[in-house]
Amino acid sequence: MMVGSEGTLGMITAVDVKLMPAVEARHPIVGFYATVEAGCEAIEAAMASGTVPSAIEYLDGATMAIAGGAFPVAVPDGTEIVIVGEADGSVREAAEGRELLAEALSDGALAVHAPEAASGVDALWRWREGVGLVVAGHLGGKLSEDVAVPVDRLADAIQGTLEIARRHGLEGCSWGHAGDGNLHSTFMVRRTASDDLGRAHRAIDELFGMAIGLGGTISGEHGVGIVKGGQLRRQWSPAAVDLHEGVKRLFDPSGVFNPGKKRP
Amino acid sequence: MMVGSEGTLGMITAVDVKLMPAVEARHPIVGFYATVEAGCEAIEAAMASGTVPSAIEYLDGATMAIAGGAFPVAVPDGTEIVIVGEADGSVREAAEGRELLAEALSDGALAVHAPEAASGVDALWRWREGVGLVVAGHLGGKLSEDVAVPVDRLADAIQGTLEIARRHGLEGCSWGHAGDGNLHSTFMVRRTASDDLGRAHRAIDELFGMAIGLGGTISGEHGVGIVKGGQLRRQWSPAAVDLHEGVKRLFDPSGVFNPGKKRP
């Protein structure tokens, strides 16, 4: 019950850790697709490939239009979504997983990029880690939120993010952890345009509604915290919110644990 | 929070399932060891082998003395514990895992048995599934309880089970899911001896105390239910038990969900 409570129910005073051997090898495979639907089919194929990928990431066409110029290899014309799968494990397990993932991601792809050398693998992940910064730099600022939807609704959520952006007169894009149905939906703002930020906040509010409407959640991996205060009531029934608050009162009657955070 | 609540906090009205591909192959590896310590070192070696075993089971020497005659191959003389690891996955992943596990389990072993044909694999698991019945048939009855300890205390718990049995004038043995530190500690009873069952109940009570003393829990995988009613108070502080009961009152003020179960 403490998992996900964001420090609001107690504090950790001691931890036992279980050490697992580090993986010997990791092999990313990148698929480029002409439609979001083809990319999302590849995600489901990767999940059913027979190996358990250590990562399935996606970046939509709008993200690639901004950040794709710095991608380690040339991005095929007409790319509307990029899927990055990764297989890891022992040297041989990772090699086996790589083949299964490559097969799954090749179906319906414009092209597949599978760096072999460590330098190519590092370049790919270094680029991926920089995507948020590049997108923020495009207009000078951005508002990003972390939502999640069932994996089979991911294509709807990717398209929905773009539609919300358009309705608010903003540039939008998304990327995220596709295997978990987790989107980082992003609305770009000009720091010199005083109303951009307000429109982005309204877009984010619509984004939460879209995620809930698709059977998803207002938070994927970033938690609720202060920023999403008040949003849990949109996702949960009043009875569920009452139970949530009741548990908080039970564990923390004096309100000393991370006060003010995770307000439903 | 519902996980582990044993139906006492609510009921499931709908379920979404995520389908994963069935594994293509599974390869069990059996190691036989002359000391419990050597077997427990092999367990830790298997966990650190670089593959994630789909199972790590153990059966102690007392169990093997009763059930080992029906084992699919001859059990080496002097076997005090048997470890069964299993690798699964795609054909090649499972083959790779098999090699890693075989290497890990060979160290310090009297012998290793690695059936290749499906008939040998099936015979092994069929035997394993019958162990409880064979042990029950040895004297006519048994009391078994499911406890768990940190994996690095498993050897102490295996020896402790035998010592508890001796103190109560009973035959004892144990087997279980070694990778989870999960023991099914067993005390055999004669159905014709009226005091055997009472002594077995007192032995089980001591067993719970031993598990808690080793930093473990009164329940591994079988839950608390009615049989372990009152035992949670031995494992948890009064404050933790109060919170546990408070959550139950909060979710189920009328006491309609699985009433009488999981009494702390």
Image (cartoon, coloured by chain):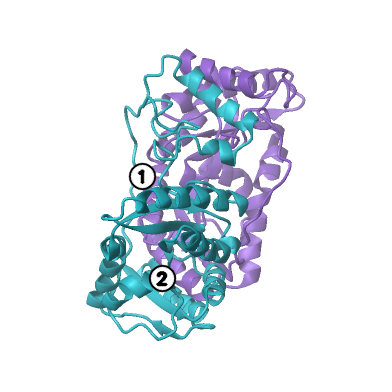
Chain colours: A purple, B cyan
Do we see residue A52 in this rendering? Answer: yes
Looking at the rendered structure, the number of numbered marks drawn on it comes to: 2
Q: Residue B119, position in %: x, y? A: 22, 76
Outermost residue toward the left in this view: B119
Few, some or many residues within 10 Å of mark 2 (<14, 14–19, 20+): some
Amino acid on which the number 2 mark rests in the picture: Ala
* B63 horizontally vs A14: left or right: left
Mark 1: secondary structure: loop
Amino acid on which the number 1 mark rests in the picture: Lys
Q: Foreground: A61 or B102?
A: B102
The chain ID associated with circle 2 is B
Is the residue A5 above or below the residue A28 in the image?
above
Q: Which residue is mark 1?
A: B18
Q: Foreground: A120 or B57?
A: B57
Quadrant of the image occupied by residue B174? bottom left
Marks 1 and 2 in Cβ contact (< 8 Å): no
What residue is rendered at 39% in x and 85% in y?
Answer: B76
Mark 2: secondary structure: helix
What residue is rendered at 71% in x and 35% in y?
Answer: A11
- For the residues labelled 1 and 2, the Cα–Cα distance comes to 41 Å
* B148 horizontally vs B186: left or right: right
Is the residue B218 above or below the residue B11 in the image?
below
Few, some or many residues within 10 Å of mark 1 (<14, 14–19, 20+): few
* A190 horizontally vs A176: left or right: right
The chain ID associated with circle 1 is B
* B261 horizontally vs A15: left or right: left
What residue is rendered at 46% in x and 15% in y?
Answer: B253
Residue mark closest to the camera, 1 vs 2? 2
Q: Which residue is mark 2?
A: B62
Instruction: Tell me which label, 1 or 2, sits earlier in the chain.
Output: 1
Is the residue A223 above or below the residue B219 in the image?
above
